[in-house]
Image: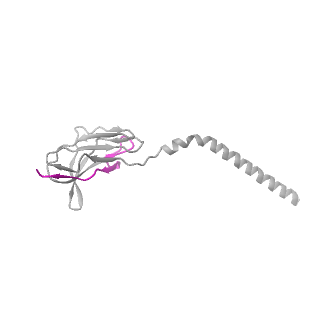
């Protein structure tokens, strides 16, 4: 009787190992073709905004560039939405881009850039541009990610 129990346990463990091996082979055969899709889903490389100079004179326009560094499509309403001015140690909203009827959202495809000239800044100081972006079209402004440009200085004439 003891021999029968030992043989059946050994036989059961061999069947279990064989079934595990078969299931592992099926898993790798089915999901190995999905490897490229899984690795391309998330690209967390953030976009960036840069200006064409770091110093301007009152009345100059700023050429701003929004660069999508990821492979994913990003949705924006422009190169920037807000201009902020430095006040001692904090940033305050200086101006907001206003569009009649709302600003249309458009895609910036992976590894591409868009450019835009800003209106002339009318006060001297230190500024930066802010862009709200999303990886999904139609996100509310509050839910979008924000990216900030380099700081730039506007000097009096």
In the rendered structure, the answer to whether residue 31 lies left or right of residue 138 reads right
Question: Vertical placement of 38 versus 86: above or below?
Answer: above
Quadrant in which the N terminus appears: bottom right
Count the marks: 0
Relative height, residue 1 to residue 136 (above, below): below
- Residue at the spot x=24%, y=37% of the render? 101
Q: Which residues are magenta?
A: 132-157
Query: Which residue does the image show at 40% across and 48% down from the upper left?
Result: 45
Q: Is residue 139 left or right of residue 99?
A: right
Whether 100 is among the magenta residues is no
Residue displayed at 46% across by 46% down? 42
Q: Is 149 covered by the magenta stretch?
A: yes
Furthest residue toward bottom? 89
Q: Position of residue 147 (x, y in %)?
A: 32, 50
Q: Residue furthest left?
A: 157
Residue occupying the point 16% across, 47% down: 121
- Here the colouring is one colour
In the displayed structure, would residue 11 be above or below residue 77? below
Q: 43 or 23: which is nearer to us?
A: 43
**Image coordinates for residue 126, horizontal then vertical, percent:** 20, 55
Rendered location of residue 64, percent (x, y): 26, 44
In the rendered image, residue 154, in percent from the top left (x then y), is placed at 17, 51
């Amino acid at each position: 009787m003891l021999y029968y129990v030992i043989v059946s346990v050994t036989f059961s463990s061999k069947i279990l190992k064989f079934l595990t091996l078969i299931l592992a082979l099926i898993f790798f055969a089915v999901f190995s073709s999905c490897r490229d899709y899984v690795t391309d889903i998330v690209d967390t490389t953030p976009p960036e905004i840069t200006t064409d100079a770091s110093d301007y004179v009152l009345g100059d326009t700023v050429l701003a560039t929004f660069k999508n560094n990821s492979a994913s499509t990003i949705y924006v309403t422009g190169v920037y939405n807000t201009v902020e001015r430095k006040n001692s140690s904090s940033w305050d909203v200086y101006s907001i881009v206003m569009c009649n009827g709302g600003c249309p959202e458009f895609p910036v495809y992976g590894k591409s850039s868009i450019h835009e000239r800003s209106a002339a800044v009318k006060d001297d100081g230190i500024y930066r541009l802010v862009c709200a972006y999303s990886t999904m079209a139609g996100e509310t402004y509050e839910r979008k990610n924000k990216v900030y440009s380099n700081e730039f200085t506007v000097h009096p004439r």
